Image (spheres, rainbow, N blue to C red):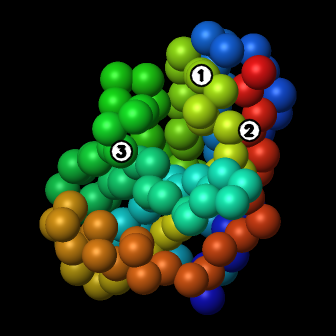
């Protein structure tokens, strides 16, 4: 089972930037799909940025397009979310998700797999004022 630890959150002013990190540990034989999700108080968890690792394809929810970028570390099991031009609407707890598989999934398949993900970590809080 994969364990996930998110970090890098904090309290920032609108317009500032943050980079979130997610470190995955445990039995990771091949990363297939990776993603960042967020949940604001009183709202459902939503997908923010997804990465189909084998195809190198990404997708973003409309509200963060052009401002957020998902990437993975070159030599370790780390996932990043680079966030710029933060606004109050980005305030939420952010979680990462990692799905492993022996084969590469397309982005649509990753979207489905990550929507079914249940192995959440503690998340990291981002507060924008």
In this view, the residue in front, 27 or 42, is 42
Q: Residue at x 78, y 65 (%)?
A: 122
Q: Residue furthest top?
A: 15
In this view, the residue in front, 49 or 91, is 91
Q: Which residue is mark 3?
A: 61
Up-down: is 13 above or below 6? Answer: above
Residue 66 picture location, percent across and down: 35, 23
Up-down: is 39 above or below 113? Answer: above
Residue 36 shown left or right of residue 11 in the figure: left
Q: Residue at x 60, y 35 (%)?
A: 90
Residue 118 picture location, percent across and down: 56, 83
Residue 78 shown left or right of residue 112 in the figure: right
The mark nearer the N terminus, 1 or 2, is: 1
| Crowdedness near tag 3: few (<14), some (14–19) or many (≥20) residues, C-alpha within 10 Å | few
Q: Secondary structure at mark 2?
A: strand
Are the residues at dot 1 and dot 2 in contact (C-beta closer than 8 Å)? Answer: yes
Q: CA distance from mark 3 to mark 1?
A: 14 Å
The mark nearer the N terminus, 3 or 1, is: 3
- Residue 65 quadrant: top left
Residue 117 picture location, percent across and down: 49, 79
């Amino acid at each position: 089972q994969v364990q996930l630890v998110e970090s890098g959150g904090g309290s920032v002013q609108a317009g500032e930037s943050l980079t979130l990190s997610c470190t995955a540990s445990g039995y990771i034989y091949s990363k297939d799909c990776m993603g960042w999700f967020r949940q604001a108080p009183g709202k459902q968890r939503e997908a923010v940025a997804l990465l189909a690792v084998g195809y190198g394809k990404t997708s973003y929810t409309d509200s963060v397009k052009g401002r957020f970028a998902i990437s993975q570390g070159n030599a370790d099991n780390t996932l990043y979310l680079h966030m710029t031009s933060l606004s109050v609407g980005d305030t939420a707890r952010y979680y990462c998700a990692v799905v492993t598989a022996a084969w590469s999934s397309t982005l649509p398949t990753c979207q489905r797999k990550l929507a079914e993900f249940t192995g959440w970590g503690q998340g990291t809080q981002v507060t924008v004022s």
